[in-house]
Image (tube, helix red, strand yellow):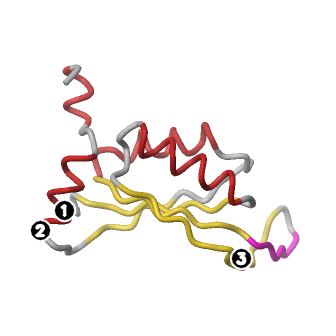
């Protein structure tokens, strides 16, 4: 399993995407969150095909933070069932990954209070 991940979620409003991104970075769950949009999403929801404009958040983090990232997204997300998907980062520049490590708190640090 990859140590590093990108977590994606989508929101209806840019303000919601900014709030989610800010929460993830402020809580040190993500080193960086890029907001992309609007994008067009076509999906089936409750038996109907829907087409909506949405904003994507791409959070750069580590696998050991995923559970807390999902929880934070759910706390700030207005959707009944938000998209929350983690994609492994299989390679990256060593210096960028070191920077990410410095910006994201690991689960073990949280448990020891450090």
Task: State the residue at coordinates (57%, 48%).
Answer: 20
Residue 42 or residue 94, whichever sits in front: 94
Q: Residue at x 71, y 68 (%)?
A: 54
In the displayed image of the protein, which residue is found farthest to the left?
94
- Per the image, is 23 magenta? no
Please state the extent of the stretch shown in magenta in the rendering. 48-53
Write down the residue under mark 3: 41
Separation of disc 1 and disc 3 at Cα? 31 Å
Q: Height in image: 108 above or below 14? A: above
Q: Residues within 10 Å of mark 3 (few under 14, many from 20)?
A: few
Q: Is residue 8 above or below residue 109?
A: below
Does 49 appear in magenta? yes
Name the image quarter holding residue 76. top right
- Position of residue 64 measured from the top left corner of the image (x, y, whole percent): 28, 45
SS at circle 2: helix
Residue shown at 32%/54% (left/top)?
A: 61
In the image, taking residue 4 as reference, residue 80 lies left or right, namely right
Give me the disc on residue 97: 1
Residues at badges 2 and 1 in contact (C-beta under 8 Å)?
yes
The reply to whether dot 3 and dot 2 touch (C-beta < 8 Å) is: no
Q: Quadrant of residue 104?
A: top left
Q: Quadrant of the C terminus?
A: top left
Q: Earlier in the sequence, mark 3 or mark 2?
A: 3
For label 3, the SS is strand
Marks 3 and 2 sit apart, C-alpha to C-alpha, by 34 Å
Assign the N terminus to one quadrant of the image.
Answer: bottom left
Number of labels in the image equals 3
> Which residue does the numbered mark 2 point to in the structure image?
94
The mark nearer the N terminus, 1 or 3, is 3
Residue furthest out toward the top: 113
């Amino acid at each position: 399993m990859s140590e590093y991940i990108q977590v994606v979620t989508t929101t209806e409003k840019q303000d919601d995407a900014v709030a989610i991104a800010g929460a993830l970075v402020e809580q040190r769950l993500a080193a960086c969150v890029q907001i992309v949009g609007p994008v067009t999403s076509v999906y089936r929801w409750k038996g109907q095909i829907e087409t909506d404009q949405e904003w994507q958040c791409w959070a750069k983090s580590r696998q050991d933070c995923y559970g807390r990232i999902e929880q934070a997204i759910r706390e700030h997300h207005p959707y009944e069932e938000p998209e929350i998907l983690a994609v492994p980062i299989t390679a990256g520049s060593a210096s960028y990954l070191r920077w990410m490590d410095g910006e994201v708190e690991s689960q073990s640090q949280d448990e020891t209070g450090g």
